[in-house]
Amino acid sequence: MHVACPDDPRFIRDERMCLSVISKTVKGALRLAAEPEEEVCEERRCKTLKTVHTLTLDVGPNPPCDPEDSPIPGGRLLSRDLTSAFIDADPAQRGFHAGHFRWTDAGVLVSGTLSGITNAGTHRDPFEPACQECYAPGFLEGRFCGVIRKARDEALIGCNVIGIYKLRLREPSQEGGPVYGVMEGVIVCGCD
């Protein structure tokens, strides 16, 4: 599955489009889906831990930011292949992750990808309030991009859904556990 994300400056500048807001609150679980693997690279004297998790999120609206008539009011987001790599073969260290997702809700299907950084704090100095350090275990933050494949309103089919997410594991561990967070973004539809 290839998702073409509308993140090219020429696309943004040259294409006629209509945007609408999505602002969601999420909660769910991150579960280990495969045995973790440790890799050793002798040439660089490093070790890397790789994990694969299943991420299941119940998605709900975030009023007043999310419109009452949102084309995707909530639903469930599922990633069966959220794959991560961690520094020093330690899941408490910084790493990065990526996976495919399916987001379903009452006749709506969005499929796409998510990717980001794990265990890093972005709400730190110089931002106010600075509520994190650069090392923030249990945080997954990144970008999602998908395409609406099914919708009650056929005009939405083929539109993109792009945005950012910030997730937090309640009790960080290699196995996963309960997770909560936010998704903020836009729906991008071409204007013919």
Image (cartoon, grey):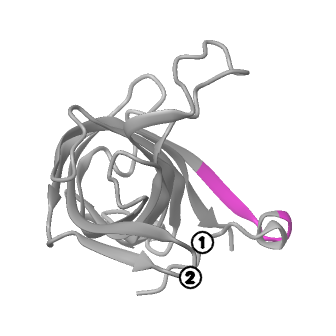
Question: Quadrant of the rendered structure where residue 54 is?
Answer: bottom left
Q: Is residue 186 magenta?
A: no
Q: Does the magenta stretch include residue 14?
A: yes
Q: Please state the horizontal and vertical placement of residue 53, each as a whole percent of the image.
A: 22, 63
Mark 1 and mark 2 lie on one chain; the one further toward the N terminus is: 1
Which residue is located at x 27 percent, y 67 percent?
Answer: 51
**Mark 2 is on which residue type?**
Glu
Find the residue positioned furthest to the top.
129
Q: Please state the horizontal and vertical placement of residue 45, each as a whole percent of the image.
A: 52, 71
Q: Mark 1 points at which residue?
A: 5
**Mark 1 is on which residue type?**
Cys
Seen in the image, is 6 located left or right of residue 49?
Answer: right
Query: Which is closer to the viewer, label 1 or label 2?
Result: 2
Which residue is located at x 39 percent, y 24 percent?
Answer: 63
In the rendered image, is residue 69 in sight?
no
Which span is picked out in magenta?
Answer: 13-19
Whether 140 is drawn above or below 158: the answer is: above
Callout 2 crowding tier (Cα within 10 Å): few <14, some 14–19, many ≥20: few
Q: Please state the horizontal and vertical placement of residue 86, each as a whole percent of the image.
A: 41, 59
Which residue is located at x 61 percent, y 12 percent?
Answer: 129
Label drawn at residue 43:
2
Between 13 and 92, the one nearer to me in the picture: 92
Which residue is located at x 84 percent, y 72 percent?
Answer: 10
Q: What element carries label 2?
A: loop
